[in-house]
Image (spheres, coloured by chain):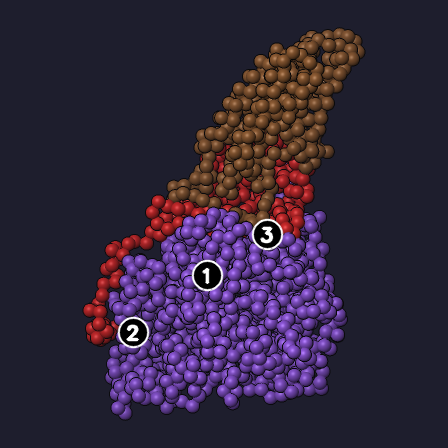
Amino acid sequence: MNQPKLNLSPKVSDEVRKTTCYMCACRCGINVHLKDGKVAYIEGNRDHPVNQGVLCAKGSAGIMQHNAPSRLKAPLKRVGPRGSGEFEEISWDEAYDITCKWLKPIREENPEKLAFFTGRDQSQSFTSFWAQNFGTPNYAAHGGFCSVNMAAAGIYTIGGAFWEFGQPDWDHTKLFMLFGVAEDHDSNPIKMGIGKIKGRGARVIGVNPIRTGYNAVADDWVGITPGTDGLFILSMIHCLMKAGKIDLNYLAQYTDAPVLLNEDPKSPEYGLYMRDKDGKQLVIDRETGKLTPYDQPGVKPDLSATHRAKGVTHRPVFHRMAEMYLSDDYAPEAVAERCGIPAKRIRAIAAELARVAFEEAFELDHEWTDFRGEKHKTMTGRPVSFHAMRGISAHANGFQTCRALHTLQILLGTVEVPGGFRFKPPYPKPATAHPKPHVGLTPGAPLNGPHLGFVHGPEDLALKEDGTPARIDKAYTWENPMSAHGLMHMVISNAHAGDPYKIDTLFMYMANMSWNSSMNTGGVMEMLTDKDENGDYVIPHIIYSDAYSSEMVAYADLILPDTTYLERHDCISLLDRPICEADAVADAIRWPVVEPDRNVKGFQSALCDLGARLGLPGFTNEDGSQKYADYADYIINHERRPGIGPLAGWRMGDKGLQSGRGGVNAAQIDSYIKNGGFFVEHIPDGSNYYKPWNTAYQSWAVDMGLYDSPQPYLFSLYVEPMRKFQLAAEGHGERQPPDHLRQRIKDTMSPLPIWYETDQQGNEGYTITALTQRPMAMYHSWGSQNAWLRQLHGHNPLYLPTKLMRENDLKDGDWARVSSPHGEITVPVMEMAALNENTVWTWNAIGKRKGAWALDKDAPEATRGFLLNHLIHELLPPKGDGLRWANSDPITGQAAWFDLKVRIEKAQAPRESRPEYPPIKSPVGQGPDKLAWKVGE
Amino acid sequence: MHPAPSVIFFSTFSGLGFGLLFWLGFGFPAVTGWTAFAFFTIAYILAVGGLISSTFHLGHPERALKAFTQWRTSWLSREGWCAVVALVLMALYGAGLVFFDQRWTLLGIIGALFSLATVFTTSMIYAQLKTIPRWNQLPLTPAYFLSLSIAGGALMAGQITWAVVLLVIAGAIQIATWLMGDKALENSGTDMASATQLGNIGTVRAFEPPHTGTNYLLREFVHVVGRKHAQKLRIIALGLMIIAPVVLLLLPFNHFLALIAVVAHVAGVLTSRWLFFAEAEHVVGLYYGKR
Amino acid sequence: MTSLPASTEKKLGLVIDLDTCVGCHACVISCKGWNTENYGAPLSDTDPYGAEPSGTFLNRVHSYEVQPAQGEAQLIHFPKSCLHCEDAPCVTVCPTGASYKRVEDGIVLVNESDCIGCGLCAWACPYGAREMDQLEGVMKKCTLCVDRIYNENLPEEDRQPACVRTCPAGARHFGDLGDPDSDVSQLVAERGGVDLMPEQGTKPVNKYLPPRPKDALPEFDVLAPFLEPVVDAEPKGFLGWLDKALEKI
């Protein structure tokens, strides 16, 4: 044998630079290998708290994203009609001049005429700061059309949610239950966790109409009827309560279950908590039988005792829960048909939850002290954990469904305990510790506070003096009072309709609103190009920033070209959506591991320039000069509160560098770079469970600057603010809802989780639910420009269950006409047996507009790919009352993507999937016809 | 399998060329001088032309000489050797006939045997492949190549009686390869269950392919021929390759009819060879839910 | 060269866990990235932004739907790359000796400078593990990251194939399957690892761990004791029970 001699130790690269991935929202650490100054290879960073070395397909394909031919090259000024894609390149100076020419008068006269919305922005604490300084109330990111239900329900209930807010205790959990379609957020950590617990033989139960991805590896699959998760969960709650398989001690100590409620139906405080004069919730102490604030030392709150005061009976929240959930309305037999799950199976799963939570309970040998001063020798573990994806939240009943899931977790006593669901700092943080929304505007001056926050009653709504919405998206109004993330999906529609008012400039970032990020895509394109009687555009100015030639580019008047993620500074800040783990606080940066070779600029740096040119106080020194040279300068030098900046690592203390609180450190970013692009500090042992009530954690969190004082609180099985909105709807209080909304508020804003069928008016004859999921190897539209990823998902069939294939005489590769009350598409179909029999689905955002993303006009994304968005309207079908009813959750305004109901029939194969749109002119040309990407020798 | 023109032309024409050389090596027809020159030229154009055509499907034809190194294990390498030896020996033998009016009988016989060996090695390239059950049939696949080569050679060499007999035999073998071939994949024991090892759970069906686009494997190995289409082509192949020449040869001899017989035969073999590739199912197709 | 070694010192290979693979394609792209930049010619793509993008990949993830006689259909993700067979038919058919199986570790490789691009090795492989690079005209295949696993320029913990290093679910394992005491061999023994297409006689080194039984939650009848009602269904009864239960805490 003479084998060739191989060099088994070739040089891997000249240099490794460590930064943060941006191929999706997961924010993994990456090692970028460089050869001759060019990106040669990207892999996961082993030391990084999020991904611990692993990296998904998107992350590994970053090199193709960074070098994509669809990158914008310079600022662009529109020269053709809107939507044509005809632009000319201009200088940054000219781009800034145009922007200032539009924005300066707005700021001086009426700042609300600027609507500034950022899409998949990971710098919201910065962009919101800019918008606040500008003075417009009209700012939000994409949370409203993504999954505000998930976040808001969690924060109102337990002071945190899934995804960035918390994670299962992968090291101890024995039963993991995963709800909802989409397979999106926290994707690498979830995969790592599932791999870990399956390796240990733990059971995974997936509840999802579609058995793909995580549900494919789940030990048990529950192919639920879409939109009924809440009902299924409440039925399990019924079973568990009836069997007494609930953690009474946990409920009494750490939740509002024992808090007394006013039970006098005539009282204007009917259904509100009984509070002392300091506003503290009151309970009966089981030891003394006396009324007492819940948090006093030694108090053992009683779940069962009632209290009569001033002629009004007060009963604990838990009484209400017993009355509500023990009702046979929630018996498995009563819900089985609607959920599409046999009653026996519901009972079996509830029983398994009970078995694992209580029979497999265990103790960790960690001593800890709770907020009442009681010392506990051990920590009780209940090894059942839950997680949910977007699927359960993107319905008009999604908020209540998410609340139901948290209620189930709480009843089992498995939140923040070993084996259960755990918060990641800065969570736990109850809704009361968050700001309230602010809309107080003064021409020429900043807004009176942060835009987004959590309302606690009608007094917090964002209404003008005349009662009309203060915000263009109608967030925090009676239509959707608890819209904590705004309603980005309504901005264009409302601005076009002039409802509640007209705007002058729409300024957007990273949001593909004329394509996959909008409902009613075709309608949005018309709204963006519509002209008034004078021949002027109804939305007069549109500024858009993106790194790539997305579909939205063609609809803007001015383009500010962003950099790729490897060319920019960013901070993944604790002020925003950080990258913490349950055992550690962490944040991270991006930094230019390579310099841009085009005339582009990080959007945040451009905002620093613009902020100075517009004279925004936060961006200007006293002498009028520019305060922050660029985003990096801001990251280092900005302080939100004294000692609290965007980054928590390597801050300057009296005795040198320190974590959390501290002064500005000019070398902070260098320290991050040296450390691999991130900062992590572990939570001390004994502080890392029972965090909301654990004094050791609370004081550590104060030291870290997560809170300014300890914030122990009770979980809210009962969300009192919702009761306040109901009371208003019942006629109490000064601020009153419009009459047409009264009944809906009474019906939907139950302070205990309920399930209701979403509004089906206009859906008659449309009986099949149509869903989308995000493929794990693609992130919305970003994958289409990626030469490697688009080979995995270059077009998308509509998956039909076997039954619907048979009924419609369809076979793989046939085409079907899919219609909804709003629209019609004609698309290729494929059979899938492991699918709820009344559900169809496809991959999200694979379909592309011709001419976008530097793709050939015959690219399969455009000829066979398609969007379901064409079938979904941002409004519900007209009810004949002349009102515009949003297709959103009535509580939070979350876009109800997954309420889509369709009809299907076989169709002749068309030339291309329908609807067809004419190509837009590509401002960047088309990509090369061959690739052999090797930068080294 | 993808019916690549280069391989179809190669196997058809080199088969015919080496078949003719085989007959010439044994002295049928016993020609010399310019007549011999004509016969040998035709044989070499067919054999060498076929071989050259086969290099068209190579990624790096300039490295083709390396293919002579692995004769111990590789049928393709052996084919190369046999072809070179046969062509050199037959060239010497032919030179004797053309220029010296000499028949070096032993040399001719050895050359003839190497010509046949070349066709055999070609057939073994296909027959050895367990991955393509339709081809992986011994001795049927070599018999198919050899019988057509010898019969075609006889036709070209003007050996009418032999040609008729051998064509009939080749036709019979061809029919046998089709009949056996149709059952080959099923009989091979390789199916989606063995490919995925998931058969013990239930019935296995390919769901999403790994990539939405195509790839080398699908282009090279998955070629679906409609059943009706295949039946028609089989009849055409058999008609052109066997029946037409046999009928024409049985008619009173006429150079024009003989030419037609040769043309029909070649067209038939091309069709048969197209089917040989197009109908062959590579087991990798099972991973894609295709055959 | 194209004769196979009678035996190899090690049998390096992969163990792929079909019970855990979520089908995310991380391994596919990580492999593409590493092997585009490293061993041999880059893995090219034709028409990368066009109507028919098609590139060379050394690892692809299939998915299969399996319908049991009873119960719900299952979906199984199925990554597949070269199995580094002990009896590798792709090696013996190679006319030039470009394909070979390493004596040291059993890795099957293509020496690209000797490859004439005839494609016969791909014909001989039942698994579709070899792909002809359309721009380079040579045969590409999984190298088991031979330029990583011994690479002294990499930290020791990174000396494993790119696909294994990146797999988020931990569904891929790398090691010496010739050593019965190795972690991978133990895993195969424990989980009943199998060969693909054993009847082809290729004796693959890579093993697949079959999915564990699905939808096997016990019937409610078995679990019923865990949901025994504490009292009659009425809330009043429940609150009575609650009082008693609380006394015990």
Q: Which residue is mark 1?
A: A902
Q: Mark 3 is on which residue type?
A: Arg
Count the labels in the image: 3
Q: Position of residue B152 (x, y in %)?
A: 63, 19
Q: Mark 1 is on which residue type?
A: Val
SS under mark 3: loop
Chain letter of the purple region? A
User: Nearer the observer, disc 2 or disc 1?
Assistant: 1
Q: Mark 2 is on which residue type?
A: Met
A885 lies left or right of B168: left
Q: Position of residue A733 (x, y in %)?
A: 40, 89
Pointer 2 and pointer 1: residues touching (CB < 8 Å)? no
Which chain does the residue under circle 2 lie in? A
* Depth order, front residue of A438/C154: A438
Q: Which residue is mark 3?
A: A911
Q: Residue shown at 63%/73% (left/top)?
A: A530
Q: Position of residue A563 (x, y in %)?
A: 67, 66
SS under mark 1: strand
Residue A631: quadrant of the picture: bottom right
The residue lying furthest to the bottom in this view is A310
- The colour chain B appears in is brown
Q: Which residue is mark 2?
A: A324
Quadrant in which the N terminus of chain A is drawn: top right
Residue A668: quadrant of the picture: bottom right
Q: Residue shown at 59%/54% (left/top)?
A: A912
Pointer 2 and pointer 3: residues touching (CB < 8 Å)? no
* Depth order, front residue of A16/A594: A594
Report, in whole angstroms, how far the alpha carbon at label 3 lies from the one at label 1.
23 Å
**Can residue A831 be seen?**
yes
Q: Are marks 2 and 1 on the same chain?
A: yes
